[in-house]
Image (cartoon, grey):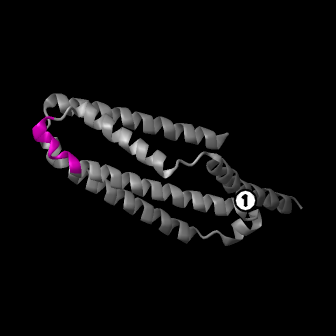
Amino acid sequence: MLRIAAAGLTALFVTASPLAYAQTAASAATPSAADWNNLTDMRIDVVKAALKLTPDQEKYWPPIEDAIRARAKNRQARFSEIEKRVTSLREGSPVEVLRNRDPIDFLQWRADALAQRSADLKKLAGAWEPLYKTLSPEQKQRMAFLALYVLHEVRNTAEERTEDEED
């Protein structure tokens, strides 16, 4: 009898945790395409303003901006896909969710997402390389400060998400 109760509780927790996460994630407001574009424009403006490019350096900027926009577009597509997955999980019954989960499909989806992110970062690094070689020490210092600030904010956001998930 104790084994049956333990198995039942385990099944309940395994079933309920993805659904609770799905409800939390789906309840967050999903930005519109215009919001994504505005956010991307702001990020580009901040970086460009921080660097204070010279007229000679300006010619290296368009490929960087294209890479930033492509990366943002792909990020938006990943978030849309996640939203669809979460919605489908939330709409299904807990038993169906458990019965139909496919860890191999999830691993393949995750690998594809990571490969896309990798390709986007390689494109961004390749676009930055020619401009970075022309930056003055002061510009490189401003770029390093901006990069550290962004990494700090990303870390804080990740920690907040972890805390929210734990609650």
Look at the magenta stretch and give its main secondary structure: helix
Tell me where residue 100 appears, x and y as whole percent: 67, 71
> Which of 155 and 26 lies nearest the eye of the viewer?
26
Does the magenta segment cover residue 61? yes
Tell me where residue 61 appears, x and y as whole percent: 20, 45
**Around disc 1, counting alpha carbons within 10 Å, would you say few (fewer than 14), some (14 to 19), or many (20 or more)?**
some
Give the vertical position of 42 relative to 78 (above or below). above
Tell me where residue 138 appears, x and y as whole percent: 17, 28
Name the amino acid, label 1: Thr
Q: Quadrant of the N terminus?
A: bottom right
Q: Quadrant of the C terminus?
A: top right
From which residue to which does the magenta span run? 54-62
Residue found farthest to the top: 138
Q: Quick check: 57 left or right of 97?
A: left
Residue highlighted by disc 1: 15
Tell me the element at label 1. helix
Q: Quick check: 141 left or right of 93?
A: left
Residue found farthest to the right: 1
Give the vertical position of 119 relative to 53 (above or below). below
Q: Residue at x 13, y 32 (%)?
A: 136
Report which quarter residue 98 is drawn in. Answer: bottom right
> Which of 129 and 66 lies nearest the eye of the viewer?
66
Q: Residue at x 64, y 41 (%)?
A: 166
Tell me where residue 103 appears, x and y as whole percent: 58, 68
